[in-house]
Image: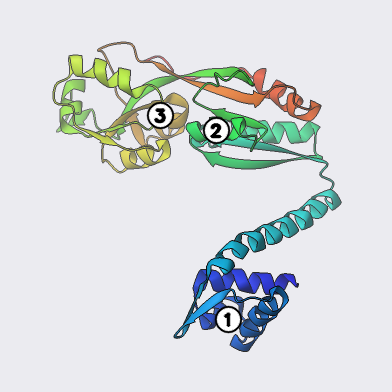
Amino acid sequence: MELSWLNTFITAAEEGNFRRTADRLHVAQSTVTLHIQNIEEELETQLFDRVGRSVRLNPTGSGFLQYAKTILENYNESIEYVARRLQGYQETIKISVSTVVATTYLPNWIREFRNVSPETEFSIEVTDSRSVVASVINQECDIGIGRIPGIQEQLESIELYNDPIVLVGPKGVGVQNEREVSTNEIFHENLLFTYNHPLYWDDLLFQLRQHVSNVRTMKVSKVHVSVEWIKEGMGISFLPLSTVKDQVEKGNIDRIPFPYFSLPSAHTYLLTRKNQNQTINSFIELISRREFTFKGDQQ
């Protein structure tokens, strides 16, 4: 059975139409038909039911589809493996990382490690912190870096740094008609974007409502989206300093004084399974010995 037949079969299953399959694969419709016929003849069974000009998988075809995808995925991975070897790569470190870390510290860590270990490549999955923990537990990655600690016995959890939480808003949010606007007024006049971090929001909101009445909130689950919306003047938020420092320094958003109570810190953790190989341990050691400073973390 040829790989091109399997590719045609998978595409036809997705499109549900042989003409659209041909257009997508840039082949003649007769070629699509021939490939499907070849597979069905080799398997000695039909895989599609024909309904007018459309086709749909029958139960046998649906089951075979998963095997066809696995075959192609394994083939592509094997080709990529050989290509990596020819390029000099000897080992791959798989990292699952939260968006916050992926857009701040991770690029420098990888760049520094590749200077001393150029034969090591990296595979990066950017996701949310809860998925980072699951990915490490399920052995889908070698290292996880996120905002939630690992408490499972089989995991090693290393606290990397504490990131001060700051209140930020659109440029000029603290001034209105040449008059300085109080923090209380800012809360009453702006939406507060919440739950863009997995841990600190419940306690923070509870305390905030003891000091500020009628806080209007909107749940925005991603930090980078919150930052962009703040730049557009849509609201304010409490965010880790590392994620907003550049925007504050560039003058795109403003830090807002917060006089009511001490704000928490966002902790960042490196998670890994115990007894990793030397290359992974070397990368972990590089990250673990970094010194993290947050310029302007007091205001």
The image position of residue 205, as x and y in percent, is: 27, 21
Q: Residue at x 49, y 25 (%)?
A: 147
* Amino acid carrying mark 1 in the image: Ala
The image position of residue 184, as x and y in percent, is: 17, 21
CA gap between label 3 and label 1 equals 45 Å
* Amino acid carrying mark 3 in the image: His
Say whether residue 253 is left or right of residue 61. Answer: left
* Amino acid carrying mark 2 in the image: Ala
Q: Which mark is residue 22?
A: 1
Q: Earlier in the sequence, mark 2 or mark 1?
A: 1
The image position of residue 264, as x and y in percent, is: 38, 15
**Quarter of the image with the C terminus in it:** top left
- Label 1's element? helix
Reply above or below: 210 against 241: above
Q: Which residue is label 2 attached to?
A: 134
Asked if labels 1 and 3 touch by Cβ distance under 8 angstroms, the answer is no
Q: Residue at x 61, y 80 (%)?
A: 26
Q: Residue at x 60, y 30 (%)?
A: 137
Graded by Cα atoms within 10 Å as few (under 14), some (14 to 19) or many (20 or more), the crowding at tag 1 reads: many
Q: Which mark is residue 197?
A: 3
- Label 3's element? loop
